[in-house]
Image (cartoon, helix red, strand yellow):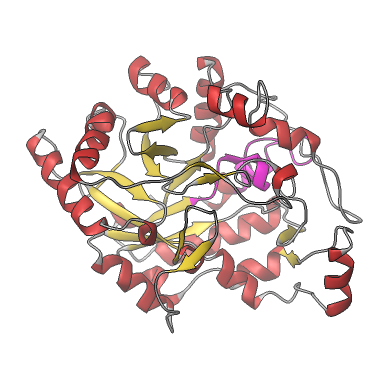
């Protein structure tokens, strides 16, 4: 086994009452994707899905087709984003149906996306408006921690659930946002043993841009000082009680990119409402994507196929240009090489993501490259 690629999976492709109320009836991730427009010469928008079409995740046939595509590419399983707000779940239906039905027969795990939802979370039209909180992420304490654990216990006991070192994997998106993260980890580990599991394998996502906490007004405050190295950042997360960290190198890569440009004139033009922003040459950027510590046994690197948030945002700061399947294959091969010296169980690479179309961050087939990004993964493995 060269590597265990686990793909982050967004369930925002079916209507829910809350989104209907906030954005209008029938809102899903496709709403913004279909409305996207090119903002500069050579900018490929909108992105149009191919094999799977503009799917609805309430359909089991869609979920089966996704699993088949992923399996053929060599992806081990999906890591479903999971939304829990002090007893309130959102976007839970697709995963609940996967567990209840036993289909598709494809491995999975969960990542608690523990961030608040504001009016900027999903809708590009709100990007320039005053921020407002729609669903605040709260952490009431032990009673809620227990209720949260019990809500996912059937999934943790499922034979399809992904394990590392024999333990079910659970990922936390933003460790610094959780005010009692150590107590939460301890409570869940204790509960897992009490309910017949061999403990949990807890992974904290380790992105330096996530060292901020979102306040009730939607603004963010730094909750820890800048660290001098990736090693310090990773060790800080491990010291919280996590078994491993998922190293997310996107911002590190951007700092090394030769494709970045910004000057005073462009800033002035942007303030006048003309869409001008930052672009990054994909191949140059991902060359600096990984840190030396990604070779640690308990650090799991991330691969990123594309990045373009313009369907959700009003500007194009941070668009990765020339992100082709060929360039992505080289990126995957680099990641595979980095994990090759680890024990087979720990040759984990997180793919961000399977289907985040609103961030231009997906490997599902589209009309531009077909199954090219999936083929790139298969070839690299």
Q: Looking at the image, which residue is at 65% across and 27% down?
A: 27
Q: Residue furthest left?
A: 194
Q: Looking at the image, which residue is at 63% across and 29% down?
A: 28
Q: Viewed as shown, does residue 323 lie left or right of 97? A: right
- Please state the horizontal and vertical placement of residue 184, each as a whole percent of the image: 22, 51
Whether residue 377 appears in this view of the structure is yes
Observer-nearest of 165 and 173: 173
Observer-nearest of 284 and 272: 272
Q: Viewed as shown, does residue 34 lie left or right of 148? A: right
Residue 355: say if magenta.
yes
Query: Does 295 appear above or below 358?
Result: below
Q: Quadrant of residue 270?
A: bottom right
- Please state the horizontal and vertical placement of residue 135, each as a whole percent of the image: 48, 40
Residue 247: say if magenta.
no
Observer-nearest of 371 and 216: 216
Q: Looking at the image, which residue is at 53% across and 37% down?
A: 10
Whether residue 78 appears in this view of the structure is no
Q: Quadrant of residue 315?
A: bottom right
Q: Viewed as shown, does residue 255 lie left or right of 185? A: right
Q: Looking at the image, which residue is at 63% across and 36% down?
A: 364
- Please state the horizontal and vertical placement of residue 179, each as a whole percent of the image: 30, 58
Q: Viewed as shown, does residue 127 lie left or right of 73? A: right
Q: Which residues are magenta?
A: 351-376
- Please state the horizontal and vertical placement of residue 263, each as a whole percent of the image: 82, 78
């Amino acid at each position: 086994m060269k590597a265990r690629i686990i793909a982050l999976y967004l369930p925002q492709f079916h209507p829910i009452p809350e989104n209907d109320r906030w954005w209008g009836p029938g809102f899903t991730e496709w709403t913004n994707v279909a409305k996207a427009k090119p903002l500069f010469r050579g900018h490929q928008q909108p992105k149009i899905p191919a094999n799977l079409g503009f799917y609805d995740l309430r359909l089991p046939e869609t979920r089966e087709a996704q699993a088949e595509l992923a399996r053929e590419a060599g992806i081990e399983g999906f890591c479903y984003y999971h939304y829990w707000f002090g007893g309130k779940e959102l976007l839970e239906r697709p995963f609940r149906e996967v567990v209840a039905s036993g289909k598709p027969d494809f491995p999975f795990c969960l990542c608690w996306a523990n961030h608040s939802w504001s009016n900027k979370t999903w809708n590009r039209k709100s990007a320039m408006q005053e921020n407002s909180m729609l669903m605040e992420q709260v952490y009431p304490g032990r009673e809620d921690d227990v209720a949260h654990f019990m809500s996912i216990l059937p999934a943790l006991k499922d034979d399809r659930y992904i394990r590392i070192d024999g333990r079910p994997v659970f990922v936390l998106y933003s460790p610094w946002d959780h005010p009692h993260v150590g107590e939460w980890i301890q409570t869940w580990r204790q509960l897992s043993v009490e309910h017949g599991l061999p403990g949990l394998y807890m992974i904290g996502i380790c992105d330096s841009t996530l060292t901020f906490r979102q306040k009730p007004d939607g603004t963010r405050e730094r909750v820890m000082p800048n660290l001098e190295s990736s090693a310090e950042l990773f060790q800080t997360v491990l010291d919280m009680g996590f078994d491993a960290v998922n190293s997310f190198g996107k911002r590190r890569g951007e700092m090394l990119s030769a494709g970045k440009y910004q000057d005073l004139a462009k800033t002035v033009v942007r303030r006048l409402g003309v869409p001008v922003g930052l672009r990054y040459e994909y191949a140059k950027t991902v060359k600096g994507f990984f840190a030396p510590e990604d070779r640690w046994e308990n650090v799991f690197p991330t691969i990123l196929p594309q990045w373009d948030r313009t369907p959700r945002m009003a500007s194009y700061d941070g668009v990765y240009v020339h992100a082709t399947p060929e360039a992505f294959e080289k990126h995957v091969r680099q990641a595979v090489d980095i994990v090759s010296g680890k024990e087979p169980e720990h040759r984990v690479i997180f793919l961000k993501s399977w289907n985040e179309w609103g961030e231009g961050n997906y490997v599902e087939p589209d009309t531009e490259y077909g199954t090219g990004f999936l083929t790139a993964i298969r070839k690299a493995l």
